[in-house]
Amino acid sequence: MGRYVLRRLLQFIPVLIGTLFLIHYLTTLGIQFTGNPVRALFGVRQPPDSVIAAVSAKYHLNDPCLQQPGNPCFGLFVDRLASYARGDFGSDFRDQSVLDLLSRRWPVTGRLTLIAIVFEAVFGILLGVLAGIKKDRFADQGVKVLTVLLISVPVFVLGVLVQLALGVYVGNWIGGKEWLPDWTGEVFSVTFQGDHPWLSLIIPGMVLGALSLASIARLTRTGLIENLSSDYVRTAQAKGLTRKRVIGVHALRNSLIPVATYIGADFGFLIGGAIITEGIFNIPGVGGLVYQSIIGGVVPVTVAVVTILVLIFLSFNLLVDILYAVLDPRIRYD
Amino acid sequence: MSTQTVPETGELGTADPLLAVDDLHVQFRSRDGLVHAVNGVSFTVNAGETLGVIGESGSGKSVTSQAIMGILPPTASVTGEIRYRGEDLLKLPEQRRRAIRAESVAIVFQDALSSLNPVFTVGFQIAELFRKHRGMSRSEAKQEAVRMLDLVRIPNAKERVRSFPHEFSGGMRQRVMIAMALALDPDVLIADEPTTALDVTIQAQVMDLLRDLQAERDMGLILITHDMGVVADVCDEIAVMYAGRVVERAPVRDIYATPAHPYTRALLRSIPRVDRKGSALDVIEGLPPNLARIPQGCSFHPRCPFVQERCRLDEPPLYQVGYGRDSACHYWEEVVDA
Amino acid sequence: MTERPMEAVAQEQREVQDGPGPEDAQPGRSLWGDAVHELIRNPLFIAPLLVVLAIVSMAIVPQLWTSVDPQACQLADSKQGPSPGHPFGFTVYGCDMYSQVVYGARPDIIIAVVCTVGTMAIGVALGTLAAYFGGWVDVLISRLTDIFFGLPFILAALILLSIVGSHSIWALSAMLILFGWTQMTRIMRGSVLETKNRDYIEAARALGAKSPRIIFRHVLPNAIAPAIVISTIALGTFVSAEASLTYLGVGLERPTISWGVLISGGQEWAVAGHPHLLIAPCAFLIVTVLSFILLGDALRDALDPKLR
């Protein structure tokens, strides 16, 4: 097992550097192709000259390699890596460091993502098991319909519609009823409430996790059905074990393995979805930061935050890979 | 109907066989219609006896064994009787049947790699039986698991109890399956092709193990296989199955010496022999029938070298050929003389 | 609960043809032949197929579906609800919603088709090469896939498009292809890995067939099924992606007409009391994506030998 972890770590590092380089290359390409590095950073706004000069110096915008489309600019890349290693991820145009900006926001996004993951895992697996056990019967068809619908709706459409329905209609309806406790109002509020950091994130969390929930349910269902017709399930039955145990312990354990990998890969999608969800529900999280920096044209912040998000994503994947080995002993000797 | 050669008495007495299968029929609902997998199978097994069930794929032997265990899918409909110590298992409520599984009647499957759960240690899978059936604690059950692994001659049992199925060789894995089956000291063990997936030398070891364990515990053993070479040493009685029926039943020596059914005869003749090197292999012409459309009359008639007009019309009952011998062939006397 | 005994029995019967029995044996059919046969009879395949064809026809010949000019907008009509001749009402800018929705199909379908073809081409090529040749080819391609995979799609789009600033269909498509090929590659690699170890490949090799021939004639036709299923679903995913990216501000924008543009344009006003601004474009979007997914699902069920 130790060797497996080590090997995964060794694979992790070049991929990490490779992805960071990819981000770097994209940024430099983008700058090179617009021809004007300064313009690339500022978008359509035209800041005062002093700001331009300061930013140019800081981001090495005068480097000749930025004038040559296609040049990977390794020197700049190494510089950037060096500053990351120092903990310097750049700052916005008002000189607030990216790390500062993030420190205020990441707890919110963290909570949102956590709610989403718990929601999608718990309900996704439950629904998948239900559908798998009652294959082709009413419950199964119901789950199938529900999951296909959820998958077809892009996150932002779902968010917008949910906000419309729950936030405006239900929220107003609740507001009028005095016999309902206050916290229901918080749960269904349209936007983030600072003094109820968990409650008001429940609905957005559910929206964020909805699509993944559908995929997890489908994965679990397929896995369970496959495993239920396997030989070792037959053996478990022959051992006189209860049906509950045969399904819940023997079949389920094997079915959860692909689900674990899915959650790992899904994290990347969740990050993207968080940006959208935070935008819709006005949540002051990391996604909101990215969203605003795009609209505001603050490219250094966008790039820096994306880099950090990628770091987190890759680390999370590494953890999931290790979890996978814990769940499936066969691959420890890969 | 069956022709039992063991005399039946009215009460549960010493004359009751350990396991008696009586006119078993199993059908499956499938896309191609009703599949008649088992069509009137009867046999008995007593303590200390070994019954060999021979047949090709599709003969219904595995379905029979799973019917005895009660682990057929819901698409199966089972009729007949399966009496364990006089009690008809098919009439028992599921809870009672579950208790009987593994405690009284156990089964060993063919492919140990796919029949063992890959994500749990073998110790866990054996201990599970003790924990769930006998209510033992985890540590007690683990000790029992080690004891069982020792019993099936797995070296280093104490450490290997923590290993996963894929970490064992084929022969070792099969022993693990045997250990699991024997854990609760059942009276009847069904071994469904236990050595088919193994090398010849390992086969011999596993068969020896089975034989020793059976003798030690005075178990009834049902050995299912398609390999006639394996059964000669181990079995007392042989039942030959074809298209879901027992077509011949006899003590082992008699079957090899004077087969009384054309199918048995053809099977024996098709075994390649060293002393007939150079001559063409004997094969059985034709193919086994589609169990959704079994031929009228004798199910073997399309492939039978002794076939006559009557065979195409009348399904032969089990004729009594001798003491403890039956054959489902109208013309068994010719077969015996041939 | 276990299917094995019946399946083992029935499968043998199928492999071994009927003996000299009174009924005829079933004619042998290939995997694809069987699949098509089953699909035609499946309403969950025919219905979405019809929907997709309808949407595609909207993309190719919108004039067939509406005679109203989508660009004929009058601010005075802004945000008006449904009325005679304008079944879906008007958009924020006073354009006829129905015709905008119809014309909006085109960019989405173009993006869907272009991106799917692109990712499939790259994915099938890379995945097959990696799996078939193994060794350093595999390591190289797999690491490359991991690297691209490490950059979530939306994030990459955000970076690139916010810098480049282009809102054209082609920029968007190029970007989606650039970051969408990883999934297809992985699926194809897995499928080829599984296929190449099958016995008939060994047989072909033993008979002296060279690699390219083996790949094209034996490996690909059998390994391509999962890729086809994913591609069908991918068509829907790309439509979804365009809408999401447009909503984020880096996708398409006015005057290009697409469902994403309509939705992001109408969102604020819809919440403020004009729900019809959202309903039509959302419905079209959802129904289109849904249809692609149902098609893919039906294909998967038809092609998966284990579920037969």
Image: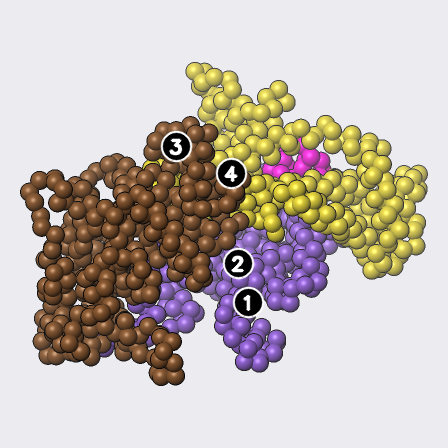
Chain colours: A yellow, B brown, C purple
* Residue C129, above or below B160: below
Query: Mark 1 is on which residue type?
Result: Lys
Of callouts 4 and 3, the N-terminal one: 3
Q: Are marks 1 and 3 in contact (CB under 8 Å)?
A: no
The chain letter under disc 3 is B
- Closer to us: A159 or B215: B215
Q: Which residues are magenta?
A: A274-292
**SS for tag 4?**
helix
The chain letter under disc 4 is B
Mark 2 highlights which residue? Answer: C230
On whether residue A160 falls in the magenta region, the answer is no
Q: Are marks 4 and 2 in contact (CB under 8 Å)?
A: no
* Residue B56, above or below A308: below
Mark 1 highlights which residue? Answer: C196
Discs 4 and 1 share one subunit: no
On whether residue A287 falls in the magenta region, the answer is yes
Of callouts 2 and 1, the N-terminal one: 1
The chain letter under disc 1 is C
Mark 3 highlights which residue? Answer: B131
- Rounded to the nearest angstrom, the CA distance separating label 2 from label 3 is 45 Å
Query: Mark 2 is on which residue type?
Result: Ile
Mark 4 highlights which residue? Answer: B158
**Which of label 4 and label 2 is nearer to you?**
4
Quarter-wise, where is residue B331 in the image? Answer: bottom left
> Residue A144, can we see it?
no
